[in-house]
Image (tube, rainbow, N blue to C red):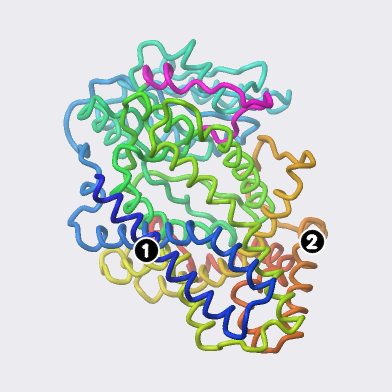
Amino acid sequence: MIFRRIAFFALVLAVAAGLTALLAAVLGAGGWTAAEVLILIAFLGTAPWTGLCAANALAGFAILMGARNPARAVFPAWRDEGPVTLHTAIAVTVRNEDMGAVLPPLRALLDGLDAAGHGDAFALYLLSDTQQPEAVAAEDAAIAAFRAADRDPARIHHRRRLANTGFKAGNVMEFLDSGADGHALMLMLDADSAMSAEAVLRLVRAMQADPQLGIVQQLIVGRPASSAFPRLFQFGMRAGMRSWATGQAWWQGDDGPYWGHNAIIRIAPFREHCRLETLPDGSAILSHDQVEAVRMRAAGWKVRALPEEAGSMEGNPPAMPEFLRRDLRWLEGNLQYRHLLMLPGIRLMGRWQLVQAILLFAGAPLYVAMLALAALNGATGGAEAFPRCTALALTLAWLAALYAPKLLGYAEVLLKPALAARYGGRALFVRGAAAEFAFTLLLDPISAFNKALFMAGLPFGARMGWAPQNRADRGVGWGEAARMLWPHTLFGVLVFAGFAATSWLAVLWALPLAGGLLVAIPLCVASSAPAVSAWFRTRRIAATPEEIAGG
């Protein structure tokens, strides 16, 4: 494994160094200004994440194209057959959820386990943090009816806490302390998770095959979505995560990730080693999952990723406001890891996992700073000696590296006829990929500015916390979009005014990098509009294989 990691990080450094050299050639063409020096410094801060994207994608793509069964190639404990001897608690955390959406996938899972002859090895626990009286009553009634309709009502349990202490991690640990006796394993699901019996049984058999496995995290893909925003977002995420997770599993091995759901956990070591204390300021850890993985591994247990997408799904935010709020909650949680980096007993790879999680968000303000500095530099005459060809090469190379996971994921589908057929054929797939990539180029600068704006407020007490999530499709009105996104739009106008003062060529160069800021409000409205969503559904643009199979 050490040689894989050396090769991987050498590739990360090579990509980062190559992009930095290209940027230096562009910035230094006519001498250096103060703004250009600052741009280079900011870019150096973003380069490690860009290198990671490219390196993970390249490693994953090589395995996806070269191995007969890529997931098995990086997950030695794969088992499709054999008895199921370990009892498993299916734990589902809920808080003010629409139980009409939560319970049907669980019914399908229980029925599938029964049909496979293994239903008696599983019990379902709905772990509730719901406190609003109307939601409590609806939840109680729905679960009571669900339980009464089961062939064995005694295997379905409903627990509710009086206080939301420690958020989801506190809810789970309280269950493990008082309600998990008799179970060796816990299948962790979120309220919007959907897993097949085949996928769950594979995870259980893997834990049986390797008694040192502490956590196995399966790849997660988006559930079929009717609204334009989630269907576009998850179409690209699915392609990207397939290559990313395969490459990551190849070089991380037993030091893998945990994403908090659609994963199986060995209860005894998790309960012993993964109990989370509060942070130095007394606040609870929000992004608990990766901390739990790091601690499980530090205790000598393996944490593995299973990069297989079949049978493991989740819901995605229905509109841009929910997406941006979720991003900020993750950002706040991941930045908390800075308090944990020097804790004793953590393995070197564990510290790297925490650093990597921080890098996921830390580049946002640097990217925004680069845009502002580039516009200022151009407006003040610092870009007069602009090397067009080198700048174009830099832009294309940077976009290729940053988006390498999804671009190579798309390439895999196009190069595998059977996989392309699951998407309705290559022509339909290309239309979906083109629409998604254009959408991503517009969304990403909006998301980056949103994160940068929030991070600027952290020293002044800005907080997201962990509020209940809206998962239902909805439209976004112009007023709501304008109230949320006017700062993003204003920043975009100022940036492009600076580029326009330089030349129209500079404006064209900046469009794929920052153009989304100018259309943030209409994009928010359009991507959730019923008519737009119906147009995408009718033409099956960005349709998942599950949507295609369902007709």
Task: Name which quarter of the figure residue 465 lies in.
Answer: top right
Residue drawn at x 71%, y 66% as measured from the top left? 520
Q: Main secondary structure of the magenta part?
A: loop
Residue 409 marker: 1
- Horizontal and vertical percent for residue 35? 69, 71
Residue 139 in sight in this render: no
Residue 318 within the magenta-colored segment of the rendering: no
Q: Secondary structure at mark 1?
A: helix
- Would you place residue 181 above or below residue 64 in this image? above
List the single residue furthest toward the front. 31
User: If the image is split into quadrants, where does the C terminus sit?
Assistant: bottom left
Q: Would you name the residue on which mark 2 appears?
A: 487
Cα gap from disc 2 to disc 1, whole angstroms: 34 Å
Give the number of the mark in front: 2 or 1: 2
Residue drawn at x 34%, y 70% as measured from the top left? 411
Amino acid type, mark 2: Pro
Q: State which region is magenta.
A: 267-288
Task: Name which quarter of the figure residue 239 lies in.
Answer: bottom left
Question: Callout 2: few (<14), some (14-19), or many (20+) C-alpha neighbours within 10 Å?
Answer: some
Q: Secondary structure at mark 2?
A: helix
